């Protein structure tokens, strides 16, 4: 073979022998180290977008020195691409080898961000139909957040801001879904209870004696909406002594003055039955003893 390969730089003696006449010739050749070898490589790493994903990227941008074509290796595994994708977090050793198998290496790291999470109180009680501000806390700064969606249990959108002015008449579950600029998502829920219990206030004893105090039976309530459909008062024999289909709440209501057919009824214990329609349209019946004195 007229081509010889030197394994290392240095002086080599070449001997040529003519086998037919026995003549021989020698020469000395100096093999120097090739200076154009791969010296460095330029790489760019793109970190993982969200915690737990494997979407890191390494781009091999340039090789300084050597002779192409080049072969590339990532952690010892040959790669046919200069754009290496779908990488998990970790440290990576990149190697490039030229056509003469001369090589250089570079190290890079793909980082993973901390987990993105948000939080809300587990439960909250609010007043009936009174707006209350709901807000969440996030593990990322506000400027990293792209979108916010508040929804109720019917999946109706309630708001799209960092805070929500929320009011309701009934208990519900409110959900907030938050997405970052990198597409990381988090969800939190809060159970919102509503103080919607109707409370009635009325005396169990009243004295229609004309003294200006407690002369009429009047019924009061808290701020929860309700309507009295009918109030009936029975004597101890079950006879109706008073009935009203338009009885109102409060001091301005007509009330019962303790008469039947414009005559005072006897003192004693009566049965009061109140038929109510609450704010949700449900019918309720309340029965109480009522003592009349004079």
Image: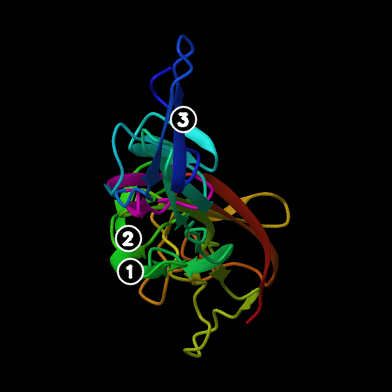
Question: In terms of image quadrants, where is residue 207?
Answer: bottom right
Q: Which residue is mark 2?
A: 145
Q: Which residue is mark 3?
A: 15
Residue 102 badge? none
Q: Nearer the viewer, residue 260 or 280?
A: 280
Residues at marks 3 and 1, CA–CA distance in whole angstroms:
79 Å
Q: Which residue is mark 1?
A: 142
Task: Return the x and y of residue 183 as percentages of the image width and height.
Answer: 36, 48
Residue 148 appears in the figure: no
Going 35% across and 43% down the picture, which residue do you hit? 156
Question: In terms of image quadrants, where is residue 138?
Answer: bottom left
Task: Return the x and y of residue 246 as percentages of the image width and height.
Answer: 38, 55
Return the disc, 2 or 3, that comes first in the chain's sequence: 3
Q: Nearer the viewer, residue 91 or 266?
A: 91
Q: Please provide the residue range marked out in magenta.
A: 37-62
Q: Please say if the residues under marks 2 and 1 sit with CB atoms less than 8 Å apart.
A: yes
Task: Return the x and y of residue 272 as percentages of the image width and height.
Answer: 62, 59
């Amino acid at each position: 073979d007229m081509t010889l390969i030197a394994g290392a730089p240095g002086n080599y003696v070449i001997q040529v022998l003519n086998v037919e006449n026995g003549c021989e010739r020698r020469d000395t050749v100096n093999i120097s180290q090739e200076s154009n070898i791969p010296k460095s490589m330029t790489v760019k790493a793109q970190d993982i977008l969200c915690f737990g994903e494997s979407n890191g990227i390494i781009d091999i941008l340039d090789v300084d020195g050597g002779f192409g074509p080049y072969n590339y290796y990532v952690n010892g595994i040959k790669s046919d691409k200069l754009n290496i994708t779908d990488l998990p977090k970790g440290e990576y050793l990149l190697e490039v080898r030229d056509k003469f198998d001369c090589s250089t290496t570079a190290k890079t790291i793909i980082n993973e961000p901390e987990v993105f999470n948000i939080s809300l109180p587990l439960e909250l009680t609010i007043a009936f139909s009174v707006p209350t501000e709901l807000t969440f806390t996030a593990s990322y700064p506000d400027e990293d957040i792209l979108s916010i969606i508040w929804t109720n249990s019917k999946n109706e959108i309630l708001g799209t801001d960092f805070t929500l002015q929320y009011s309701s008449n009934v208990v519900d579950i409110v959900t907030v879904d938050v997405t970052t600029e990198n597409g990381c998502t988090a969800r939190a829920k809060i159970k919102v209870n509503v103080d919607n219990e109707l409370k009635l206030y009325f005396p169990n004893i009243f004295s229609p004696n004309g003294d200006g105090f407690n002369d009429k039976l009047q019924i009061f309530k808290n701020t929860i909406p309700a309507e009295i459909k009918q109030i009936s008062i029975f004597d101890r024999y079950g006879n109706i002594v008073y009935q009203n289909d338009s009885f109102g709440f409060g001091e301005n209501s007509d009330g019962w003055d303790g008469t039947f057919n414009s005559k005072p009824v006897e003192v004693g214990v009566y049965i009061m039955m109140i038929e109510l329609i609450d704010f949700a349209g449900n019918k309720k019946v309340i029965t109480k003893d009522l003592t009349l004195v004079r």
